[in-house]
Amino acid sequence: MGISANRTSEANAMDLAIIRELSRNARVSLAELGRKVSLSRPAVAERVRRLEDSGVIKGYGVHLDLAELGLGLRAHVSLRPRLRSTRNAESLRDRLLAMGHVLSCVHVIGANCYE
């Protein structure tokens, strides 16, 4: 049992190393990623595929420099609209997101404890 537990912790450590490198640069090639974590390209490809298939890696994204886009000011705004239906809420969300300067809309349930 000690051997499998040791292998599991090694696997977890390697997966974490891969995740750490992908967090720094998700566009890194599999060959370069392999060099960084001391694994072959096929071994890294298999581990990344397994992390994706299992849902650990849900996707890859872009880190924006908002100031370069002319969006240097960032604000979180709370709204309490009096909406009578889900359709009205969806319409409001769609209209807000259609504004060029609104990056996201989040529906929060309950009190706003942390803003």
Image (cartoon, helix red, strand yellow):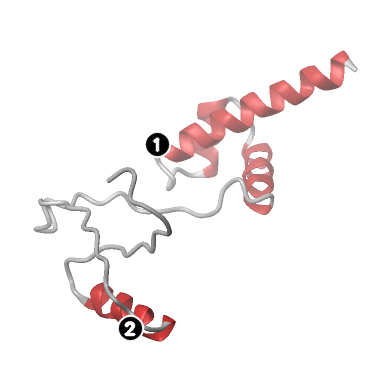
Instruction: Determine crowd level at label 2: few under 14, some 14-19, many 20+ residues with C-alpha closer than 10 A.
Output: few
Q: Amino acid at mark 1?
A: Arg
Q: Please report the residue visible at 86 percent of the width from the left and 14 percent of the height from the top.
A: 2
| Residue under numbered circle 1 | 24
Farthest top residue? 2
Q: Amino acid at mark 2?
A: Ser
Residue 5, numbered circle: none
In the rendered structure, the answer to whether residue 68 lies left or right of residue 5 reads: left
| Residue 61 locus on image (x, y percent) | 40, 54
Q: Is residue 62 above or below residue 87?
A: above
Secondary structure found at label 1: helix
Q: Nearer the viewer, mark 1 or mark 2?
A: 2
Residue nearest the viewer, comparing 30 with 106: 106
| Image location of residue 48, percent across then percent down | 62, 44
- Give the mark nearer the N terminus: 1 vs 2: 1
Q: Nearer the viewer, residue 88 or 43?
A: 88
Measured along the vertical axis of the image, is residue 92 above or below residue 40? below
Mark 2 = which residue? 91
The quadrant in which residue 105 appears is bottom left
- Look at the image and tell me in which quarter the N terminus lies: top right
Q: Position of residue 89 (x, y in %)?
A: 36, 78
For the point 49% across and 36% down, which residue is it? Answer: 32
Q: Secondary structure at mark 2?
A: helix
